Amino acid sequence: MDELLLRELAPAVTGVLVRRGADFATAEDAVQEALIQAALTWPDRPPADPKGWLVTVAWRKFLDARRAEVSRRGREQRAEAEPPPGPAQAADDTLQLFFLCAHPSLPPASAVALTLRAVGGLTTRQIAQAYLVPEATMAQRISRAKRTVGDVRFEEPGDLATVQRVLYLAAEAIRLTRQLASMTDDEETAGLLALMLLHHARRPARTRRDGSLVPLAEQDRSRWNTALIAEGVAVLQAALGRDRLGEFQAQAAIAALHADAPRAEETDWVQIVGWYDELLRLTGSPVVQLNRAIAIGEADGPVAGLAALAAVDPGLPRYTAASAYLHEKAGDLRTAARLYADAARSAPNLAERHYLTRQAARISQALRGSGPAAPAGAM
Amino acid sequence: MAKYLLLKHYRGAPEAVNPVPMDQWTPQEVEDHMQYMADFAARLESNGEWVDGQALSPEGTFVRYDGEGRPPVTDGPFAETKDLIAGWMVIDVDTYERALALAGELSAAPGAGGKPIHEWLELRPFLSAPPTVTE
């Protein structure tokens, strides 16, 4: 049992838990429990990845402790008062709700209204204003929509018609955001509109005929919608000119820089890194940190990218894939192949697993010298 | 008709004849394998023998009840577990022989070098509902 190793790892593991949202005291307790479990089990079964093992076990202990705390508090409260009437507390089922709101039995206008109300949390008055109809009309429309989907059961959440309806909502959402932006005088609403336009402009190039996703670097840029890009850039420039930066404006700026490059190799990554710095300052989000590390890899080279990645929580989804990508660019093919295979094993869906497996296969083939390595797809 | 479960193992099954792991194949071999699997499923669907097929993440958690008013206890991961299920397919076929034949076909999916993997699949019959008793 290597106590020195444990002492070294413990703070890093606590750091990972805190970055994932654990409060410090509970995180520390959880790590202590994980260390005790390590002391009991490692002598017989040493893990391949000690830090990964500790993070997994400590996070589980933290979740157990938090659920125990919630249920203890629940018992104390129940002792004081009768349970309040109404439905039981629901788990986070926003996506399910979204699918329900977009049900094909609803006319599009009602589907959007119900979505804004149930998922977006807007009031009936706000939705009525956005649709430019009287509040009573909108109230009627929403309650009719609720009755319609009231006895819909969800057998197939992936129902194609529903998904198409959800995609249709993207166009509706842009229309509504456009109205909202014209009615309000807010830079972030303009930033959101610019972001939606710039993303929507890439839609024709984003999927293959079999439905699989095309990475940004491999998209046929001649299929991007230039009118939407021009509008998005104009909206963004007007918003940025007022010098009140926010999250949506920064994201739109990154999307605009991608849209501005006629070819992937001509992307202005130095400017993109600058916007990621702003975005990180505004949000502190670990996902932004991960994307920023990849952008740094493009702007300053893979070694700088890997250095930036070292500060990111390794438990984050797609961390391993990002690390594999940067290792390949740095010329460390052996590590890249191993990491792609690791990433494929822990991929959250089959499309990603297949993509990552193919990446691992491509590099392994290059290592065996039976062919030149094709360029890696962008993350 | 009788339902059968075809189990694919990450670990725990006897070694395949062509056991080279997927990330060591060529990209074309990966494509060919995916195509074979998709064609197999499509054919079963069209002739009414397909019920379900899913792949599983290798990471899982053990959970058990811990008494009234207490949250369930979790445990794991158990790296030492010998058996690990990778995924399954459920088929609904006329005879046991048909189930064996389909499992054999699936096991012939191409792997490294474009040659069949000869993977060991576990075939488990579903316990059927009791027959309806009438007076």
Image (spheres, grey):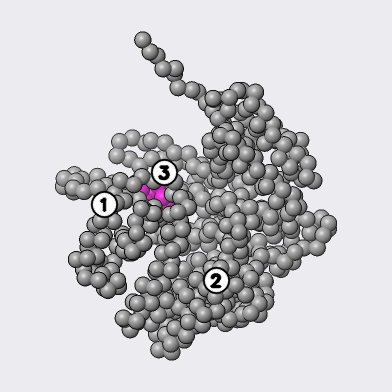
Q: Quadrant of the C terminus of chain A?
A: bottom right
Secondary-structure class at tag 3:
loop
Q: Which residues are magenta?
A: A62-67
Within-10-Å neighbours for mark 3: few <14, some 14–19, many 20+: few
Look at 37% across and 36% down and name the residue there: B66
Q: Amino acid type of disc 1?
A: Arg
- Depth check, front residue: B81 or A86: A86
Residue identified by numbered label 1: A147
Residue A294 rendering spot, x and y as whole percentages? 60, 70
Q: Is residue A82 left or right of residue A379?
A: left
The chain holding disc 3 is A
Residue A288 rendering spot, x and y as whole percentages? 50, 70
Look at 39% across and 60% down and name the residue there: A23
The chain holding disc 2 is A
Look at 60% across and 56% down and name the residue there: A210
Residue identified by numbered label 2: A202
Eyeballing the image, is A318 above or below B78?
Answer: below
